Amino acid sequence: MKAPLVLDAVTLTYPDGEGRLTALDEVSLAVPAGTVTACVGPSGSGKSSLLAVAATLITPDRGRVVVAGADTGSLNAAERAALRRSHVGIVFQQPNLLPSLTAAEQVQVMAHLAGRRPGAARERALSLLDAVGLADRADRRPHQLSGGERQRVNIARALMNEPAVLLVDEPTSALDHARGASVLDLLVRLTRERGTATVLVTHDAGHLGRVDRVVGMGDGRLRG
Ligand code: ADP
Ligand code: MG
């Protein structure tokens, strides 16, 4: 079976004064369904750029990005946005939850954005909150949740539209060690259960024992 996420010799540069800064240098990576690839490297090594390219939020200078079988280089902006909504789940470092919505509503609203039937959305949102261990927090708003709980809502939200690809940027950086470890365990379990091709970016190489593959990032290049 083809991997849901394939990066092939991807190069990305940003404008930098007179010249260009190379954030990704010929990066190739294939992530099979139901597996977690952890990408580890120091700050500034290109990890978030890698996720932004995989999420089709940024178009690389060169190389191919294939998401759920679609070669994203041949898509226009609207098609890329549609692909993102239906096939990509994104978990950023900061949950960015909407202050006025309950946990269940934060998750539910994703189905609405993807133009899905609202009827089944609440049920699915509640079942996802249950899967991330927040069944009894469904009616709380963000200020009534702990940092770890907010990150779990964030993860449930990313899974709402049954994405083939799950991209996670430093999910544990705001959490203490024990809570960070339990969020990582959760991501590994959900990846297995839901069959996502997951990329997990972190600058902290601790507690990565249960992921399928660890690749190192340095100066925009991938090692391992
Ligand atoms: P990481 O997530 O590993 O910290 P990033 O992908 O954020 O690394 O950044 C990689 C390099 O690209 C860094 O040198 C950073 O300063 C630079 N960079 C990131 N985003 C931009 C941007 N929007 N414009 C210009 N340079 C950027
Ligand atoms: Mg980053």
Image (cartoon, rainbow, N blue to C red):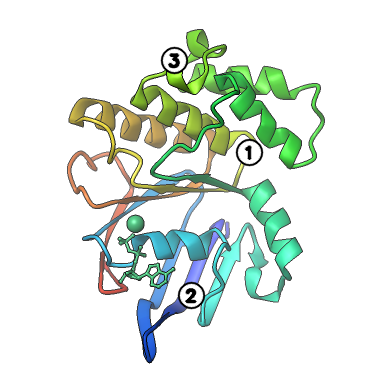
Q: Which mark is residue 144?
A: 3
**Label 1: which secondary element:** loop
Q: Is residue 69 depicted above or below 138 in this figure?
A: below
Q: Quadrant of the C terminus?
A: bottom left
Q: Amino acid at mark 3?
A: Gln
> Which x, y percent locates residue 143?
44, 20
Q: Measure the C-alpha gap from mark 1 to mark 2.
A: 24 Å
Q: Amino acid at mark 2?
A: Asp
The residue sitting at 48% across, 54% down in the picture is 32
Q: Is residue 114 depicted above or below 120 in this figure?
A: below
Q: Are marks 1 and 2 in contact (CB under 8 Å)?
A: no
Residue tagged 1:
162
Q: How many numbered marks have been drawn onto this rendered protein structure? A: 3
> Which x, y percent locates residue 199?
42, 51
Q: Which mark is residue 125?
A: none
Q: Could you tell which of marks 3 and 1 lies nearer the N-terminus?
A: 3
104 and 87: which is toward the camera: 104
Q: Is residue 28 left or right of residue 207?
A: right
Q: Amino acid at mark 1?
A: Glu
Q: Is residue 135 left or right of residue 40?
A: right
Q: Is residue 70 depicted above or below 136 in this figure?
A: below
Q: Measure the C-alpha gap from mark 3 to mark 2.
A: 43 Å
**Label 3: which secondary element:** helix
Q: Is residue 6 left or right of residue 171?
A: right
Q: Is residue 147 depicted above or below 70 in this figure?
A: above
